[in-house]
Image (cartoon, rainbow, N blue to C red):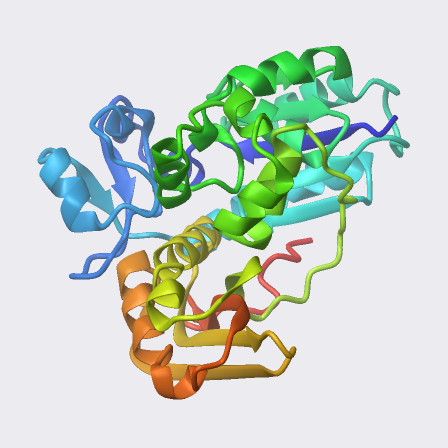
């Protein structure tokens, strides 16, 4: 059986700021660039009590929490802390898949050193990270696949460790709210709830054809995660130059309104990935694959980098036109953002995610 660990730094960017300025401790703090279209990159747990969360427009965050302290990101400081954390991971395994500056999957089936127990190694990783970063904490989930390991890392935050054993997975997934599943954002969760699907048990009761008819290839993903199925290996390679999301639909989309209806979810998922990586991009691309497998893309370069889901959706709607579709049936839609920079427009090294 595989031993997979997901490690996620707790409120990472904000925690670095609190470490470097202890006067901020215990206060509602958000890390975000200042600007009319800025979004929150991360927030302290005190700020989260007011509904301030990652990817929330900054103006909304300030309305919810007027006393919010907003700090401009210091990406160099975050990258240095991330380099130290990633170095700890590599002491135990070379099978490290960084997802962003603050989280990664580790395959500890055959560790390089230390105990054979993935749980004991996860405990040691947490201790070493705290010692070497000046007090930053990480939460870890231990299980037999990536899906459950990631679920576990979020269950006892901050500074938590959760082990999900095979015998416990079914019951845990059955009672989990659909919005807590990885890959199901607020837009999709809302649609599921309107369909009467509120928990993992409800999701598991729906057939694969039902879910793919409603959500395309994303429905197949939901069918699998409701059952705890995830065969993805921990992949240490990463050469991505864009961030995006695409779905293949079980039933072809035949009208432009049907296609436009898919854009909020695609844009939201793309925005969440950008925010998690501390990135924005100046090129938005819409990808369309037709029923005959012909493929077209259309892109727009913007004067300023975007990260906000509403802005990404606005550009995607501008690109996805009746002229582009030409009355043809569509089997796949995708939205991606490239020409990656930080949200202030400063260039970043690509690939950003290979940190050590």
Position of 82 with respect to 254 (left or right) is right
Measured from the top left, where is residue 225 in percent x and y?
A: 63, 34
Q: Looking at the image, which is closer to me, 265 or 69? A: 265
Task: Determine whether, in the image, residue 229 is placed left or right of residue 75.
Answer: right
Q: Quadrant of the N terminus?
A: top right
Instruction: Decide which of 298, 132 is in the foreground and name it.
Output: 298
Left/right placement of residue 124 relative to residue 35 reads: right
Q: Nearer the viewer, residue 223 or 99?
A: 223
Expressed as whole percent of the image width and height from the top left, the position of residue 30 reads 27, 40
Q: Position of residue 156 (x, y in %)?
A: 51, 17
Q: Residue at x 60, y 48 (%)?
A: 99
Q: Is residue 81 above or below residue 352?
A: above
Residue 162 shows in the view: yes
Seen at 25% across and 35% down, the residue is: 52
Can residue 128 be seen here? The reply is no
Q: Quadrant of residue 124?
A: top right
Q: Residue at x 56, y 32 (%)?
A: 206
Q: State which quadrant residue 200 falls in.
A: top right
């Amino acid at each position: 059986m595989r031993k997979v660990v997901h490690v996620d730094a707790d409120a990472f960017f904000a925690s670095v700021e609190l470490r470097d300025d202890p006067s901020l401790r215990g206060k509602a703090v958000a890390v975000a660039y200042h600007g009319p279209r800025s979004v929150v990159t991360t927030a302290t747990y005190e700020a989260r009590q007011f509904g301030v969360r990652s990817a929330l427009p900054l103006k909304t965050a300030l309305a919810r929490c007027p006393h919010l302290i907003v700090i401009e990101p210091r990406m160099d400081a975050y990258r240095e802390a991330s380099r130290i954390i990633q170095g700890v991971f590599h002491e135990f395994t070379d099978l490290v898949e960084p997802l962003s500056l603050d989280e990664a999957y580790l395959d500890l089936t055959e560790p390089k050193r230390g105990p054979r127990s993935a749980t004991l190694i996860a405990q040691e990783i947490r201790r070493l990270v705290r010692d070497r970063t000046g007090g930053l904490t990480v939460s870890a989930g231990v299980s037999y696949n990536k899906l459950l390991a990631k679920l576990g890392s979020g269950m006892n935050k901050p500074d938590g460790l959760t082990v999900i054993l095979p015998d416990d997975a079914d019951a845990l997934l059955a009672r989990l709210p659909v919005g807590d599943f990885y890959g199901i954002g607020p837009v999709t969760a809302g649609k599921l709830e309107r369909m009467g699907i509120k928990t993992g048990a409800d999701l598991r009761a729906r057939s694969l054809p039902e879910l793919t008819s409603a959500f395309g290839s994303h429905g197949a993903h939901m069918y699998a995660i409701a059952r705890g199925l995830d065969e993805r290996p921990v992949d240490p390679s990463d050469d991505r130059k864009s961030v995006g999301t695409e779905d293949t639909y079980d039933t072809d989309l035949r009208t432009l309104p049907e296609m436009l209806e898919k854009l909020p979810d695609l844009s939201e998922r793309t925005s969440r990935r950008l925010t998690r990586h501390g990135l924005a991009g100046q090129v938005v691309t819409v990808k369309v694959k037709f029923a005959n497998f012909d493929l077209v893309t259309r892109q727009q370069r913007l004067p300023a980098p975007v990260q906000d889901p509403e802005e990404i959706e606005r550009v995607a709607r501008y690109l996805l036109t009746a002229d582009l579709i030409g009355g043809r049936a569509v089997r796949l839609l995708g939205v991606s953002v490239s020409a990656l920079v930080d949200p202030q427009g400063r260039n970043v090294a690509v690939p950003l995610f290979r940190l050590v």
